[in-house]
Amino acid sequence: MLHLYNTLSRQTEPFTPLRDNQVRMYACGPTVYARAHIGNFRTFICIDVLRRTLKYLGGYQMRQAVNYTDVDDKTIGGAERAGMPLREYTEQWIQAFREDNDALGIETPEETPRATDEANMTAMGDLVRQLEQNGHTYRSEGSVYFRIASFESYGRLARVVQDGIQAGARVDVDEYSKEDARDFVLWKAAKPGEPTWDPGVGPGRPGWHLECSAMALRLLGAPLDIHAGGIDLIFPHHENEIAQSEGATGGPFARFWVHVEHLFVEGEKMSKSVGNVYTLPELIEKGYRPSALRYLLLSSHYRKQLNFTWAGMEQAEESLRRLADFSARLGAVTVAGRHEGVQASIATARTRFAEAMQDDLNTAAALAAVFDLVRDVNSALDAREAGSEDAVAAQEALVACDQVLGVLALRQAEDATPPVPVDEIERLIGERQAARRQRDFAEADRIRVELQDRGILLEDGPSGTRWKRR
């Protein structure tokens, strides 16, 4: 059984879905005012691993929603500066996010709502009216605010002490600190030049916090089995989601709250002023592959801060090469045979992997189990103490583990679409072999270097020349 750390209780608890063997999980998606950076993707990859663990190890059906925040202070400001309509401006970043998700092997959730979708705006209006009816709101200058003093349990997720809340003070901006806890805006009055809607609560636009509550409740219902996101969202965003949702429905909003820790870059907090905020295309431009980034971002426990380094990316590349080479070696085993010692090692690795993932997604221990499998089976193959039945069982174990991690299949898909067309690679290998037969080693070396510069490595062996992506 999966055990998950629940931010709400500050304890690790056994998890099963509330009903129908289906996990209803909501994760806060990107605010689409710019391309998502690698810090964002640490959260999205860890949530993807959670989804895969529930789906492939737990055997649960998934009903997951990841939203696009396409109207808030940042998106409106970005559209104004770009001189573009809001929908057109945010659409380009939504498409970029989807491209990066695909490149990183992140499974597509069942629901990907946009805040500005008509059905979601209607749901936001309904939610505001329900909160008004339940006595949790007040109006001021055309805006609607949530009165946090009306919600007795406010602060229990973020551990905000009620005595520290500034009674009667209110805030209109979307993001603020725990020290500034105060009444927050649900619906912002219309301003000149800003996009405006009126779902029955007056002309204006939603506050950021309202959007996620309305979309989660509309698409998944309450209580959610899991609500997930980055640790920076605990306050104010998730705290306010709880207040809004439970203030409207009168029941619990989410059973489990899962939060992913921060990503640092070379020991420093990510900051545009420092120049260490990287996107996936920027890493690719530096010669790294998406599979290596995915591997690095899931290699440490999701509740521990992770330090991104270029040396770490090189280590991730090497680890993935080991896995890909191991898989290829298994596929080449033709000698028949089954050996109990090898079969026992495979079974042990599968058990240790499952136990690690079920222990609050301990990906570091899970990867250790995978590489112990690689070591043990490679040693048996070297000693000629493993046969084709062992190779098949090891390959099946590797595939089963990778269903959860999603790194090897991603690397193999990248290898299947090399940066140089396969027919051109084969042609250049043929020309290189011809040059070597003619003892024109300078030309042979030139071809090798050319392919290397284009991302293709050549390896010469007794059976001929093998190529692989750099």
Image: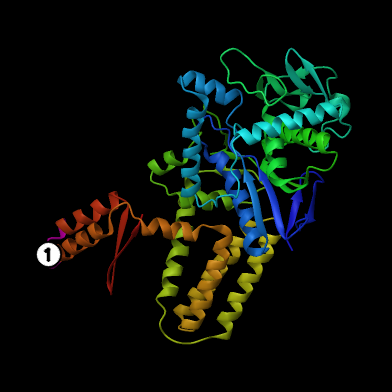
**Which image quarter holds the C terminus?**
bottom left
Say whether residue 180 is visible: no
Q: Is residue 402 left or right of residue 284?
A: right
The image quadrant that residue 336 belongs to is bottom left
Q: Of helix, strand and loop, which one carries label 1?
A: loop
Indicate whether residue 439 is drawn in magenta. yes
Relative to 22, say whether 396 is above or below.
below
**Which image quarter holds the N terminus?**
bottom right
Say whether residue 393 is visible: yes
Residue 337: percent from the left, percent from the top?
A: 48, 87
Residue 238: percent from the left, percent from the top?
A: 73, 36
Q: Residue at x 40, y 82 (%)?
A: 334
Q: Is residue 348 left or right of residue 283?
A: right
Residue 18: percent from the left, percent from the top?
A: 78, 55
Name the colouring of the figure: rainbow
Residue 467: percent from the left, percent from the top?
A: 31, 62
The image quadrant that residue 237 belongs to is top right
Camera-nearest residue between 22 and 235: 22
- Pointer 1 residue: 439
- Which region is colored magenta? 437-442
Relative to 373, say whether 179 is above or below.
above
Q: Is residue 128 left or right of residue 107?
A: right
Q: Residue furthest left?
A: 438
Q: Residue at x 49, y 84 (%)?
A: 385
Relative to 409, say whether 290 is above or below.
above
Total labels drawn: 1
Q: Residue at x 63, y 65 (%)?
A: 353
Q: Residue at x 62, y 14 (%)?
A: 191
Camera-nearest residue between 123 and 352: 123
